Image: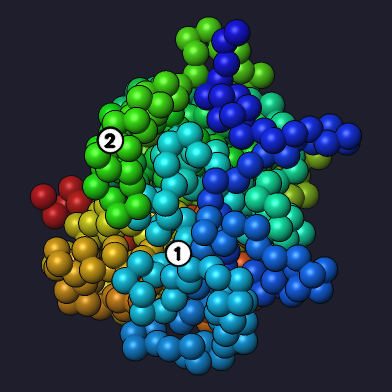
Amino acid sequence: MAATLIDKIWDAHVVARRVDGRDLVYIDRHVLHELHAPHAFGKLAKSRRSVRRPDLTFSAMDHTPSSNPGRDDTTNPNGVDLIRAMRDGSRRNGIRVFDLGDKEHGISHVVAPEIGMVLPGSTHAVPDSHACTVGGLGALAFGCGTSELEHILATQVIAMAKPKRMRIRLEGRIGSWAAAKDIALHIISEIGASGGRGFLIEFAGGATRALPVEGRLTLCNLAIEMGSRTGLVAPDDTTFQWIAGRPWAPAGAMWDRAMTHWRLLSSDADAIFDKDITIDCNSLEPQITWGTDPGQGFGITGRVPDPASVPADRRAALERAIAYMGVTPGESIEGLSVQRVFIGSCTNARLPDLEIAADVARGRKVADGVHALVVPGSAKVKRDAEARGLDRVFRDAGFIWGEAACSMCAGSNGDRGLRGERILSTTNRNFENRQGPGARTHLVGPALAAAAAVTGKITDVRKLMAGAA
């Protein structure tokens, strides 16, 4: 019987079905972080249960550590107790910690793929909604809440009702200075922030295949912003070449056995999806959000919609977003002054992201009145970027070059915007107050972010770079 890739991975990991109809899905590996793990450790201890597979469980310090150079546990005072509780709970349960100063420290969704922890056809869980990021390698990954986390720690399974399957075919060639983030934002603007609700998404098509692995990780990172529980891309030769030689990847005879299995990981030609969408990416512009959810966006030459032009049931939300963001219906947002730029997060903090931003920043200066911060996604990304001289490009331009952390994504480590500031951010969420009370966040890719930093305003990077040429 024909099956989708989602079905193949899911069915291979089902342990049993509960009386309530939910499947118990085995989790191959999972990563904790310090915002939720201490509470889950406490609940386990209270119920006199232990971590079932500490050898498959890992801890990452990513949400609360400061990104300031020379940081330690206390640089962000609000994170001290969480960091130390995470460290203590991990020690008591025999769990490996990717701690501050570790050569493999960083954001869990960046570190897990880059060391070879996550492999095609595997299942993965993190107490963070953007666990779906690693679907870019052909894995099925799930964010989980604290109660689900406790259950996974104690049993190594997650209880879930199997969602429907959606395929999004991305076809064509994207335009200049656009990348995976722009594809993802375009999808969300087309289907809406709840368009994937009730589905698991497989991204397919020529434009998907043309993406490097880092781009596929970015694309899957934003599946949750489409309303989906997770997203993935079927592995191919690009995937296998990227994984080969990574520290935790199989080697020798094990690699050969893995490849035999991995090459079978694709949806059958006659597999039926519950929903099939095709999106034309030809000449896709760099994208930017204008409002307060990731679906309120358009190409950089777009104009803010008029509430009068939308159905009545959407009008109030549109009016609220316009008021909060301080934009004007019918007008372009190009040229609006920017006070803060953030390049980083599990969405856009890998080496190719930093290279794109550095290409724009090279030989330029951060505009007066702009606070510009670049935070690599992992210690390895930071080392690799410095080996290529990217840190010098950013520092010479006037950017702050930070230590690996989630940083300004949700402001949980102290990196936050001020009330009324307009921020261009390469993160994944632009909700009201997310990056600081009253802060106004526009989601963009690294190219638009860097262009805003050096011009002090929302700028079409294509015009900026054409002028340089």
Q: Position of residue 232 (x, y in %)?
A: 50, 35
Say which residue appears at 14% left-offset and 55% top-offset: 468
Q: Contact, CB < 8 Å: mark 2 with mark 1?
A: no
The answer to which of 92 and 118 lies nearer the viewer is: 92
Q: Is residue 256 visible?
A: yes
According to the image, label 2 marks what residue?
253
**Quadrant of res 458:** bottom left
- Asked which secondary structure carries label 1, the reply is loop
Earlier along the polypeptide chain: callout 2 or callout 1?
1
Q: Position of residue 218 (x, y in %)?
A: 43, 46
* Amino acid identity at mark 1: Ile
- Is 62 rendered above or below residue 185? below
* Amino acid identity at mark 2: Ala
Q: Residue furthest left?
A: 469
- Is 303 rendered above or below residue 411? above
Q: CA distance from mark 2 to mark 1?
A: 31 Å
Q: Is residue 353 visible?
A: no
Say which residue appears at 81% left-offset and 74% top-offset: 46
According to the image, label 1 marks what residue?
107
- Asked which secondary structure carries label 2, the reply is helix
Q: Position of residue 29 (x, y in %)?
A: 53, 51
Say which residue appears at 75% left-offset and 34% top-offset: 16
Q: How is the image coloured?
A: rainbow
